[in-house]
Image: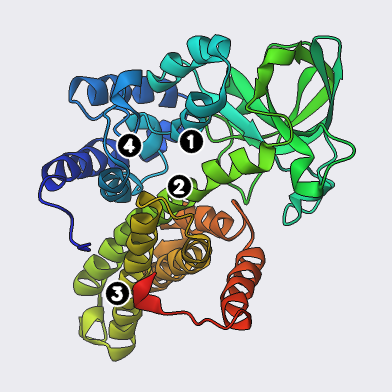
Amino acid sequence: MTFQVPDHVRPLRDRVHRFMTERVEPHEETLRGPDGAALLAELQRDAKAEGLWALGHPAELGGGGLPFLDYVYVNEVQGRSEFGQLALGTWTLQDSIMLDRHASPHWREAYLRPLVAGEISPSFAMTEPDVAGSDPTGLQTTARLDGDEWVITGRKWFTTGAAGAAYTTVMCRTETDAAPHASFSMIIVPTDTPGYRLVRETPLLGLPSGGHGGHYEVAYDDVRVPAENLLGERGKGFLIAQERLGPGRIFHAMRWLGQAQRAFDLMCTRLNERVAFGEPLAEKQLMQKHVFDSYTEIQASRLLTLAAAEQIDRGDQARVEIGAIKVYGAQMLHNVIDRAVQVYGAAGVTEDTPLSHMYRSARFARLYDGADEVHIQSVGKRILGEYRRGGSWEFGLR
């Protein structure tokens, strides 16, 4: 494979980059405010009119139909802003993949095309407040079959976008006599179902609340839904989750690269423009080290991510490679933004630049879709297992 952006992808990627830098990034504060919904709707209409809408979704569902690897390159520039996915219609990609592969005909008809068209929003509920997220086999939310209905009882949190979602896909314990990873199923719950109750929006590091990005705690008070709301087969919840999380981590890592590129651009521009002690900061060797360290970390993360994406595209689960980029990419993102804040000095911790918001948001990357420690342990165990079985880890032959 080549690590260069393919020639056939470059023009579309450049158009997405212009859309992000000219139409989205300059208006982030408005998008976070009371007029944000109207502006977002306008951006979405523009994206559809310009052929930039839902690029990673299958064409037969109304999306752009980009192959996985092509979309990876586009996702890199789309990730420059937290509003990129929303403005360009790819916020729903992981959920549409789940529905497309596993939903009953009724729910495919009800949700799939409206989801891709941006007419409805999904949400996903796995994490619980009283259970260590690093060990999801301890999840306590249950679903029991009562006649032709599932009865769901429990509490979830960090259900992103629940307040505006048409439905939530809920991970529940449905089996009582199965192995831990075969005890859970996923069930579709329309958010207007009796017993589905928003408890609160969880405040996070002083970031603005509300909108699609709000993270909600939700109670399931004996929620009843039809048996056909089961997503896939009973006991296959973890397998479906893995289908969702594998490509999803690639998408995360590429969007982190977009954020890191934006912070790198800001940092290098500031270093050339800011004068201290009679010369630009760019002449200071310690400042040059910030550039060097950021360049090497971004480039290493990018190559690791593209290599993992290529393996996923070949049909490999790439567990080691995905675990590695999840950890390294999240740390890279924090480091690059942190250096940019340092270069900006006092201005870097104000809201006068995007860096303050980016810095706080970057901290979540080391937790969601699996804490760093879990991925580090998993990668280490898998590699050591190869040697225990008499093999080795040949980096170039994966």
Left or right relative to 86: residue 383: right
First in sequence: mark 3 or mark 2?
2
Horizontal side of 124 relative to 296 (left or right) equals right
Towards the viewer: 129 or 247: 247
Q: Quadrant of the N terminus?
A: bottom left
Q: Is the C-beta separation of discs 4 and 3 under 8 Å?
A: no
* Residue drawn at 37 percent across, 55 percent down: 309
Q: Say the numbered circle drawn on residue 136.
A: none
Marks 4, 1: nearer the viewer: 1
Mark 1 residue element: helix
Specify which label sits upstream in the sequence, 2 or 4. 4
Residue, disc 4: 27
Marks 2 and 4, how far apart at CA: 29 Å
Q: Are marks 2 and 1 in contact (CB under 8 Å)?
A: yes
Image depth: mark 2 or mark 4 in front: 2
Q: Amino acid at mark 2?
A: Pro
| Residue underneath mark 2 | 247
For the residues marked 4 and 1, what is the alpha-carbon distance in whole angstroms? 26 Å
Q: Disc 3 versus disc 2: distance between alpha carbons? A: 25 Å
Disc 1 marks a residue whose amino acid type is Gln
Secondary structure under the numbered disc 2 in the rendered image: helix
The percent coordinates of residue 256 (x first, y second) are: 41, 56
Q: Is residue 300 above or below residue 180?
A: below
Which residue corresponds to mark 1?
A: 94
Furthest-bottom residue in this view: 285
Quadrant position of the C terminus in the picture: bottom left
